Every structure is written in structure tokens, then in C-alpha cells.
Image (cartoon, rainbow, N blue to C red):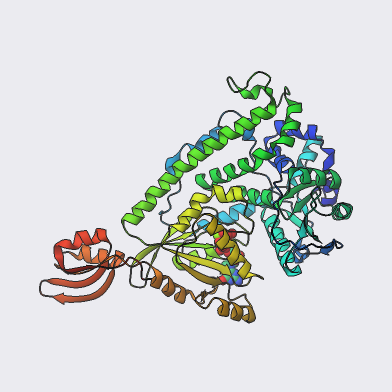
Amino acid sequence: MAPASPTQVVSRPMADASAVTATRMVMEKPALGRALLGTMILSARGRPRAGRPDGVVRPLLVLFLARLKNVDAASPWSCHACRNMTDEFFTDELTSGDRDRFDDLSSVPDYDDEVDVNTGDLELEERHALRRVVGLSTELSDITEVEYRQLRLERVVLVGVWTEGSVADAENSLTELAALAETAGSQVLEGLIQRRGRPDASTFIGRGKVDELRSVVLSTGADTVICDGELSPGQLRTLEQQTKVKVIDRTALILDIFAQHAKSKEGKAQVELAQLQYFLPRLRGWGEALSRQTGGSGRGGGAGGGVGLRGPGETKLETDRRRIRTRISRLKREISAMRTIRDTKRSGRLRNAIPAVAIAGYTNAGKSSLLNRLTGAGVLVEDALFATLDPTTRRAQTSDGRIYTLSDTVGFVRHLPHQLVEAFRSTLEEVGQADLMVHVVDGAHPDPEEQVRAVHEVLAEVGADKLPELLVVNKVDAASEEILLRLKREWPDAVFVSARTGRGIEQLQAAIEARLPRPAVEMSVLLPYDRGDLVARIHRRGEVLETEHRDGGTFMRVRVSELLAADLSRYLVTVSSIGAHPQ
Ligand SMILES: Nc1nc2c(ncn2[C@@H]2O[C@H](COP(=O)(O)OP(=O)(O)OP(=O)(O)O)[C@@H](O)[C@H]2O)c(=O)[nH]1
Ligand SMILES: [Mg+2]
């Protein structure tokens, strides 16, 4: 059978799947549950922002995003949005997958493992392969299958409300939303921005503009609208009713990307926790639909409560809420257990006084590329947002042979959903416990300063804003000279590099070295010639200030950690304590 054309499939309005049918499908088709969840749960409290100008409602400004040109209508759809929202919320027991994921804490990734330099490539291949496969099957076995596919295909129209700043700011924000949508596997068909003093309380964009949005949806054949902001459940519901397609918000989109990209047990648990916390207050509409189904035959239906879980006369909604809360507490416990393991590893590094450098920065700034460039780590690099969610720590060496660790971290983004900040708190706090933060910023981005501000905001939120920071402007190969000059004026201490071409990498290495904490104890020792092991340890872990071969052995003036100093004390000539940091 020939593949269905995009228009054939998307022309079936999503409203065809009534809430009841949709709910039934969730019960019967776990995969659909994931897709459908996005339809129903999404929204949040509309957070008023300070300083909004009293704007006049102006006509919708229709932006054909540059990306539109790249849309290949014939390409297989590859929508993963909401794929990872689990319908396990509605089951009582942990599935075996769950147990694998959370019980076996011993297999929390070993951050100190030796590196397989191909890891990144394989992972990339896998990710893309997965995308190709989805949507290839066009054989529809029954009518629900059509609806199922319908819900998964996301050809999206983006909508933003521009309340403050310049038109360029508004466009940047929507371009970023487009990149997020594409990262989630959607095809962006069009972007719309409305200039308004504040989002409309019931429809986000102005009520009068909803009709225009509806006609754009119809003319493009879109099946999803993504709003650039956090919407209330009411706003989402009204917009869905009026546009007759699925409506999701930025928070849900970011959560979905995180769900797709999390790989480690800890990352997955953190994302699931964030999703559940996002989901819980929005359970009402969803739960109402479900409660109409109570007593139905599907998975997670009436019999799911289990002994002792359901009180007399308790509604399905309450049961669902309780299950989610139970799951949330379980996840919190598991995450803190995993954290303990990570802490143990870190304290191991601390004991050995290995300085730790964290690479932080806005998503897609090139953090993983830099880590690879500095250590040959083979971490996944992709032109997608949030390619990295799991912290990767690798060993690096200074030019004089001292060892330190470099960790790649999750990227930041403007308006990072607070549930995610909470869930990733421990990962982010780890950044705060490093000895130095290498803050990477994309010099080729239209607004690098805004990225730096957004990163500082998140770091301050988790109390990780106190450590020494080395600002690194990356992608100088792709940035304009004019912008680079501006940035050099603004950030005179920053290092300008290109992870791609290698330009500036040596200066970066030198800058990192100069800022590494220096070992605490300065001492002079005379090591007998048969203690080559100690000489080697000093070279690896300490700093050699002077060496001289004498009759009785090797005389060395060194700076070492207290631990190593203790081992060297037998051979001591003189000792003095100095501050741990050069600053
Ligand atoms: N032109 C240019 N592109 C670069 C450079 N460094 C990285 N990139 C590209 O930028 C994109 C993102 O790179 P990553 O290293 O994955 O960025 P990241 O900061 O780790 O991103 P996330 O993990 O998604 O937050 C990739 O397409 C890289 O090829 C550079 O120096 N120059
Ligand atoms: Mg990365």
C-alpha cells in the first residue's frame, strides 16, 4: 500500500477522537496513552511577568520561519512528543521495566568509566534511526489506528504572545520554540506572534485572533498548536475547543524532550518526577474523562485500585491522584538514593583532591563538543536542544601533568520549567560544587547575552552561582566579527574558541589550568631513588615547583594535597600551608 500523503492523514480532524474514544484508546493502547497525555494534561499557571507594557492589540504578525523552507513534506513523520509520558500512572504495581530502572541502583552510570570514543556516534545513529522508523507503517488495520496515528503526527503551528522587548526578541523566542519542537520530532509549519499587553486569560492570544489561528491550522494541515509560554488548563481547553486541534505549551514540550533524551536511571527518574509534578495539578480534566470510563474493561480501569487502595465511594480521579503521589514519593526516595551513590563517588574524588571543572551553559552552546575537544570523550553532539541530560565526567590533564575532572552538564534554556529545575536540582547543585565552572556561550547565537543571563538565573535558583566562572565564547568560526568584537568588549576575560576548528583551545586549556585550585600544602622533600612511585604521584596529583637530583635522592619542592602530604611526610625537608585557591 502506498504511503498516505500528509494531507490525507492530517485532514482528519483530531476532534474526531472524542474524549471518550480517546480515553478508551488510552486504556487499550499504552503507546497511545503517551501521545494522548500531551493532549490532555498540558498547561500551567499563567505566570504574570513584571514590566509588561500596556500594549495595543495589533494584527497577528505571521512569521514564516526560515525553517519552514527546510520542511520536506514527503519525509516520514517522526513525532515523539509525549511519547514518554507513561501510562504507568494508572497501574498499581511497578512494572518489571520500572524495577529495572529504579531498583538496581548499583548500575547507576559510572561517571569515571573509561571512554568508548564511539559512544556519541552510536547514540546519534540510534536516535536518528528511531526517528526514521516511526511513521513508516502506513497500513492501518482498524479505525482506531487512524486516530492513533493522527495523534502522533505533529505538524505544528507555533503561537507566541509578544509582551515586551523588541520584535527581534519575540522572533528569537519563537525560533527557539521551533528548535524545541523540531527536537521533539515535530515539523514546524508556521509561527505566529501577536503583540499584546498580556496573554488573554481564556485563549492566550486575543479572542478575535483565534479564528485566524484556526484558519492557519486548516490551511497548513497542522494537527498541533504549540504556545510559547505556560498556559492554564482553562486556556488550553478553550483553545483546543476553538482550534479543534491539540494544543500544548512550552513546558510540556520541554518535559517531553527531556523524557526522550534521558538515558541514565537517574535522569529518567528525574524527568518522570518532573512530569508527574506537572501532571498532578492538571489531572482534573483528564481524570474527569477517565472517571466516565470507570468500570470499563481497559487497563488501569476500575479494578486497578487493588486491595486497600480504594476507599468506599472514592472516585477514579482521587485514586489516580493518590497513585501519582505515591509514585512521586517513591521517585523522590529513589533519586535521593542515587544521589548518595553519586555523592560517594564525588567524595572519592574530593579525598584524592582531584579538582573538578563543570562545563555549564545554554543548551546547544557546544558544551559536549568542547568536552570532546578537551578530553576526546566521545559524548553525543547533536544540533538539537538538550542532547545531553546525563552528566558525564571525564579525566583531563594539565600541561604539567596534573589531573582534573571535566563534567558535561544538562543545558539551560529560558523559562526552564520549574519542575525540571527541582528534579535536576541535585545535578545542578553538583555544578555548584565544582571548583570551577566553564560557562560556554554560543557566540553565533543572535542573543548570547540573553543566554548568559538565563544560565545565571537558573544557577542562582539552585544556589550554584558562587563558584569561580570562566566564560567561554564558542563557535567563533560561525560568529560575525562584529558580534565577536562586541562580546570581547563586554566580556574582556572570556576565552574565545571554536570547538569545531580547535581555534583557541590551547588558550582555554591554559585558562582552565590557571584557575584550578592549587593543592593546599607546599613542601620540600628528598625522595630516595627507589620511591619512583611517589615521584609519579606528585606529578599526577600535585604541582612540581623545583626538582634537583642529589646524592641522597630526588629533591623536590612541591604543592600537594593534604593526603599526599601525609604520605610524603617521612621524606620531609620543609613544609608550609597555603590557600587552596589562587584567588
Ligand atoms: N560552527 C560551530 N558549531 C559548533 C561548534 N561547537 C559545537 N557546534 C555545533 O553545535 C551543536 C551543539 O553542540 P553540542 O556540543 O551538542 O552542544 P551542547 O551544549 O552539548 O548541547 P546540549 O547537550 O543539547 O545542551 C552541534 O551541531 C555542534 O556541531 C563550533 O565551535 N562551531
Ligand atoms: Mg550536550
Image quarter in which the N terminus is found: top right
* Residue 28 percent coordinates (x, y): 71, 31
* Residue 34 percent coordinates (x, y): 68, 40
Residue lying furthest left in this view?
Answer: 551
Asked if residue 298 shows in the view, the reply is: yes
* Residue 66 percent coordinates (x, y): 76, 66
- Describe residue 433's horizontal placement relative to residue 479 as left or right: left
* Residue 580 percent coordinates (x, y): 33, 65
Labels in figure, total? 0
Q: Is residue 58 above or below residue 324?
A: below
Q: Is residue 417 above or below residue 552?
A: above
- Describe residue 294's horizontal placement relative to residue 194 as left or right: left
Q: Please tell me in which quarter of the rendered image ligand 2 is found.
A: bottom right
Residue at 61 percent across and 30 percent down: it is 322
Which image quadrant is residue 571 in? bottom left
Residue nearer the viewer, 132 or 393: 393
- Describe residue 337's horizontal placement relative to residue 9 as left or right: left
Image quarter in which the C terminus is found: bottom left
Residue at 60 percent across and 72 percent down: it is 443
Which image quadrant is residue 510 in? bottom left
Residue nearer the viewer, 159 or 26: 159
Asked if residue 121 shows in the view, the reply is: no
Residue at 46 percent across and 68 percent down: it is 374
Residue at 59 percent across and 49 percent down: it is 420
